[in-house]
Image (spheres, rainbow, N blue to C red):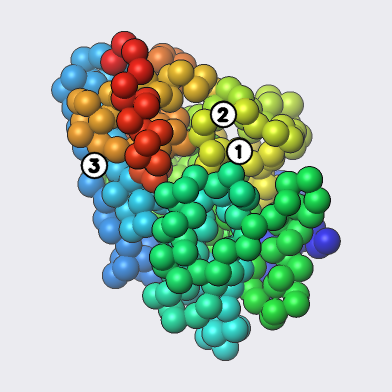
Amino acid sequence: MADPASLDHSDAALAGLAPGPDGAPAHEALAQRLSEARGALGPVAHRTPVVRSRTLDDRVGAQVALKCENLQRMGAFKFRGAYHHLSRLDPKVRARGVVAFSSGNHAQAVALVARLFSVPATIVMPSWAPAAKLAATREYGAEVVFYDQVGESRDGLAERLATERGLTLVPPFNHVDVLTGQGTAAAELIEDAGLLDALLVPLGGGGLLAGCALAARMLSPGCRVIGVEPAGGDDGARSFRSGRLERVEHPDTIADGARTPSLGPLTFALIRRYVHDVVTVPDEALEAAMRFACERLKLVIEPTGALALAALMTGAVQEARGRVGVVLSGGNVDLVRLAQILAAAGDT
């Protein structure tokens, strides 16, 4: 099986974005790609609203601006990276179709974007993928292929399908075009909310955090960028502390979008370059944040989408003072599960 990092870096080199000594392209080249992503996404992505709450401000002692990517097309920030990636493919290559592996939001994003470009999409998903995300992926017209977690890995199966069918693999996070697409969310947030003192971003594979941190460095240089992971899947926090890629083979968390066992080599290099800290929160804090969002903000967010808000509400981020941006990364939660969380006792 090919090394995903080498695949991404080969693509980057062809595009004039060859990695430097730290494993990531030069800042100027990344900034240019982020600007290109904004141009590509402008006509198609929702410019999601920035929501404020006096109740939340009083509770946490800060001026909070919530970037509502739960209201993005297909319900999550993943649309941005998927669209930017496909938009940059050679039309003849794109026409042959794409393949992706995902537990849910990346699956939906690639399926929707493929439909927009009128190309076939094959998505490799785990059998435990949330029912709502599985149904939406199929409704967007994608073929879903399940993988056996005991046997072949999902990325291995996706790469095999790409080879056998002549499809282009759309990585979930470890690619320059994907992460700069995701970073457009933070660029919009800073434009709409003004300069920030801190920016809290959910962390799974690292594409959203790396892209948002790049945008913050460009548009709000004094902003401290904090990644937030679930405590049961803290590979990113461990990697940030040790300075080398760490793995958590079977993350134990309700945040299904953050169950990646490890950051990508490219996203890790960028996180080390641009991010100030990575913190974790327990699942109970995610549920409390989801209840608060629904009851007080009238917003539906999924567990992964609640990571940054949970960190703010629990005080996990000491630097969250002054003007604080919070990315609500997605809202694709199963309604039965949401009802259970809302019905549970909790201090919101």
* Dot placed on the residue nearer the N-terminal end, 3 or 2: 3
Q: Which amino acid does label 1 sit on?
A: Arg
Q: What element carries label 3?
A: strand
Residue on which the image places disc 3? 50
Estimate the spatial distance between the alpha carbons at disc 1 and disc 2, rounded to whole Å: 7 Å
Q: Is mark 1 on a helix, strand or loop?
A: loop
Residue on which the image places disc 1? 259
Q: Nearer the viewer, mark 1 or mark 3?
A: 1
Q: Which label sits on residue 229?
A: none
Q: Which amino acid does label 2 sit on?
A: Thr
Look at the image and tell me whether residue 199 can be seen. no
Give the left or right position of residue 67, taking residue 210 as reference. Answer: left
Q: Is residue 199 above or below residue 3?
A: above
* Dot placed on the residue nearer the N-terminal end, 1 or 3: 3
Q: Where is residue 5 in the image (x, y as percent from the top left)?
A: 73, 56
Picture quadrant of residue 146: bottom right
Instruction: Name the residue: 36% across, 33% down.
Output: 338
Q: Which label sits on residue 253?
A: 2
Q: In this view, does 58 lie above or below 227?
A: above
Quadrant of the snapshot with the N terminus: bottom right
Q: Position of residue 165 (x, y in %)?
A: 70, 79
Quadrant of the snapshot with the C terminus: top left
Q: Circle 2: is it few (<14), some (14-19), or many (20+) Cα within 10 Å?
A: many
Estimate the spatial distance between the alpha carbons at disc 3 and disc 2, rounded to whole Å: 27 Å
Instruction: Name the residue: 75% across, 75% down.
Output: 163
Q: Position of residue 53 (x, y in %)?
A: 19, 27
Give the left or right position of residue 153, taking residue 70 as reference. Answer: right
